[in-house]
Image (tube, helix red, strand yellow):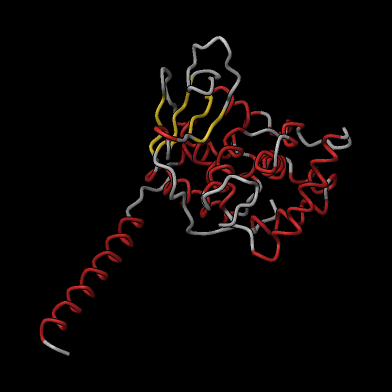
Amino acid sequence: MSTPALILTLLLLAFLFWLGWYWFFRRRRVRPLTKEQEALLERQVDFYRRLSAEDKKRFEQSISHFLEDVAITGVETEVTAADRLLVAASAVIPLFGFPGWSYRNLNEVLLYPDTFDEEYQVKAAQRNIIGMVGSGAMNRMMILSQPALRESFSHPERRHNVGIHEFIHLLDKADGSTDGIPEVLIPHEYVVPWLRMMHHEIKEIKDDDSDINPYGATNEAEFLSVAAEYFFSQPGKFERKHPELYEMMSKIFRQEP
């Protein structure tokens, strides 16, 4: 190997070593949750309460990493410590079966004081949206209704969780298409069975023969998010009512909540 090539190789190896060192120690420096934050999770997040002591620690670390990486901003409203934890929990829950994973397509979550319209306006006459993954100028952003987020975790028995719903959309979108098939999560061999199952369940909803939120029959993408809300919020009931769907979603998300 010539001297210039050797120097270039050594410089490249040094850079890769520095990059690995930087990211390793950056992740290690993430501030752990306080006892007050842990207590908030215990009070407000059912999913967290069901975890073993070891898994709670891993959940807390994932929360810390998310809060380090993603900005959470209030728009005409104050963001509380509990709000930040609820947003982070919404993000961590769907990915809990994939240790070390994070959302590469998200920079900021905006909390709105109320519902909003498709133009992200809270003072519009027609506004009924409580959550949305941004696009266009709002790409890499998510918008959530603050009251809806809080309500989602206060009443898990209702099987609705706007935060989880939108983070599922974000995962679905990661492969470039929001189509109900999250290719970043789902093994190839499950794609066709999952499609068949989705279409069967959507027909059940349309025939009024299912307790899954009717909004899930809108399309495949909405079915995935709506079913995931139910799967994570009320897993016991979901397994009893929809055992085959529960088994398939357990494989997709690599967890049995």
Query: In terms of depth relative to the viewer, which is nearer, 2 or 90?
Result: 2
Query: In terms of depth relative to the viewer, which is nearer, 32 or 155?
Result: 155
Query: In terms of depth relative to the viewer, which is nearer, 126 or 96?
Result: 126
Query: In terms of depth relative to the viewer, which is nearer, 3 or 77?
Result: 3
At horizontal 44% and vertical 34% (from top left) the residue drawn is 109
Instruction: Examine the image and state in which quarter residue 107 appears.
Output: top left
Where residue 133 appears, x then y in whole percent? 51, 36
Task: In the displayed orientation, state which residue is furthest to the bottom.
Answer: 1
Where residue 227 appears, x then y in whole percent? 71, 42
Where residue 191 appears, x then y in whole percent? 69, 59
Name the quarter where the N terminus is drawn. Answer: bottom left
Above/below status of 244 relative to 231: below
- All told, the count of numbered labels is 0
At horizontal 60% and vertical 52% (from top left) the residue drawn is 182
> Along the horizontal axis of the image, is 202 left or right of 31?
right
Instruction: Examine the image and state in which quarter residue 219 appears.
Output: top right
At horizontal 78% and vertical 44% (from top left) the residue drawn is 238
> Along the horizontal axis of the image, is 126 left or right of 73?
right
Task: In the displayed orientation, state which residue is furthest to the top.
Answer: 125
At horizontal 61% and vertical 38% (from top left) the residue drawn is 165
Where residue 177 appears, x then y in whole percent? 56, 48
Above/below status of 240 relative to 45: below
Above/below status of 217 relative to 99: above
